Image (cartoon, helix red, strand yellow):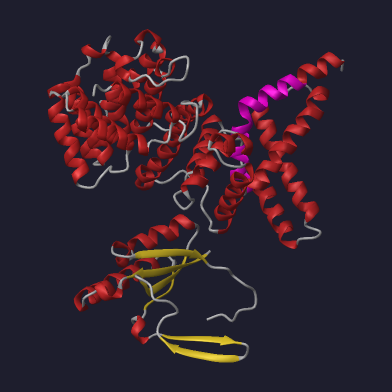
Amino acid sequence: MKFMLLIYHDERALSESERAECYGESTQLAHEIHSKGQFLAANPLHPTSLATSVRVRDGKRFVTDGPFAETREQLGGYFLVEGKNLDEAINIAARIPMARKGTVEVRPVIEIAGLPTG
Amino acid sequence: MSEEGIGSIRETVDAVYRAESRRVLATLIRLLGDFDRAEEALHDAFRAALEQWPRDGVPANPLAWLVSTGRFKAIDGMRRRARFEASLAELAERLDASARDEPERGDEAVEDDRLRLIFTCCHPALSPDAQVAMTLREVCGLTTEEIARAFLTTAPTVAQRIVRAKAKIRDARIPYEVPAEADLPERLDAVLRVIYLVFNEGYSASSGGSLTRHDLSSEAIRLGRLLAELLPEPEAAGLLALMLLHDSRRAARTSPTGELILLDDQDRSLWNREQIAEGSALAERALSSRRIGPYTLQAAVAAVHARAASPAATDWARIVGLYDLLLQADPSPVVELNRAVAVAMRDGPSAGVALIDAILSRGDLEKYHLAHAARADLCRRLGRRAEARASYQRALRLTQQEPERRFIERRLSELPH
């Protein structure tokens, strides 16, 4: 069963060296869970200053600068994992470095038929 | 079979239902992988018992018969419905295969299933309200009406909570497992919290006329007993001890007219000595373990009170010592407050007021009526009447319970001017 681990934290409260340390730890974690067959994907995201929001209403396209909403904590990255159950996903989420400063939201993924693979 | 014979079988089935239905349910949930499917299977099994036992006699092992019957009725039901829903056919075959492969499990395995059920109902991924509703419904067998009445809400609200919780268990894949060693302390905390919450709801209703809702407290104690039996954890024993010791004072806590009677003024001959004996023994044993937690320490405090033949005989020094430990295990303002009251008893009211003032000046417990009531009482004893009056009035504005309100009003009126 696939779980999406959405990593939220205050992107302004992160120094360059903290960020680098975070990437290092996350990469290590990715390898550890990969060896257990749990790793599907993971990436940090560029900060919301580089976000662009797209909406289409009544056939008209609206493209604006910034995230979909201003929030105290922002989506900073994700892990997509394969887990037997929620507890496995939670155990991975708890090891994500940003869980110590922010919040990792664990969402079960809906598998719909007919999607392309790889 | 005679009318009489059928009547007595029916009584037997009822008795088996009362004694075993929760165990059967716990196992069926594991075997069928789904709460709703398991409940349906449970009812089918008992219905079959009513039909077949008059004919074939009561089985030697009713529990095993019910589990087996429920399981196969569920598989049959799935096969029938598979004509309309293809995925059910596959599931039915899988469940059937595992049923044939699996050997007969013993009593120990059944107890594992009950633990699975408790831990799943109290999974932190469920909201606290949902944890309480699920535990009372699935583990204790209360109806949604009973749960609604107990928590002063409506049956549809409770029903919806339970439906959502079951959906989350199913769709977010909350596992039906006893947590691993490493996760046990944290997960056990959640279970203990739910049980204690149920007990406290019963012990002192959040708002409204009557001070105790007896049934909930008894339910919580029953749950606590089950947990302590199934899991050799000192804190489980500690919580059971705490609940027994609190409950032992139930008869003495309110006057016949529903007035609140404080510990100091209670008729100790009304305390339940059996509960005190059991609770004290449990507390002592838990205290001697290597994992002493907050419930155990609170139980130990309650045991010190229970040992005292009269208020004057209370070992307040020991109580303060226990609160010192409790503050380390659970550094909360409420614990600090209770410690302050104990310090006042050991060292005099001034010492107590100083501690309470320190808490309040930090901004903690500003809205907690007991903090102001305690302060008022200590000021009253020091003859600081104006302050006592002000604090009683503050407490009065904050209290939700009728008997507590009347008590504070009485104290206010007793203050000399």
Image check: B177 left or right of B88?
left
- Residue B285: quadrant of the picture: top left
Image check: B22 left or right of B396?
right
Which part of the image, by quadrant, shows the N terminus of chain B? top right
Which part of the image, by quadrant, shows the C terminus of chain B? top left
Residue A47 visible to an observer of this rendering: yes
- Residue B297: quadrant of the picture: top left
The location of residue B353, given as percent across then percent down, is: 17, 32
The location of residue A103, given as percent across then percent down, is: 36, 64
Q: Residue furthest front?
A: B417
What main secondary structure does the magenta stretch of the protein show? helix
Judge whether residue B13 is colored magenta: yes
Residue B283 visible to an observer of this rendering: no
The location of residue A56, given as percent across then percent down, is: 57, 87
Specify start and end residues of the magenta stretch as a single range. B10-33
Name the residue at 43% across, 36% down: B197
- Residue A99: quadrant of the picture: bottom left
Vertical comparison of A61 with B144: above or below: below
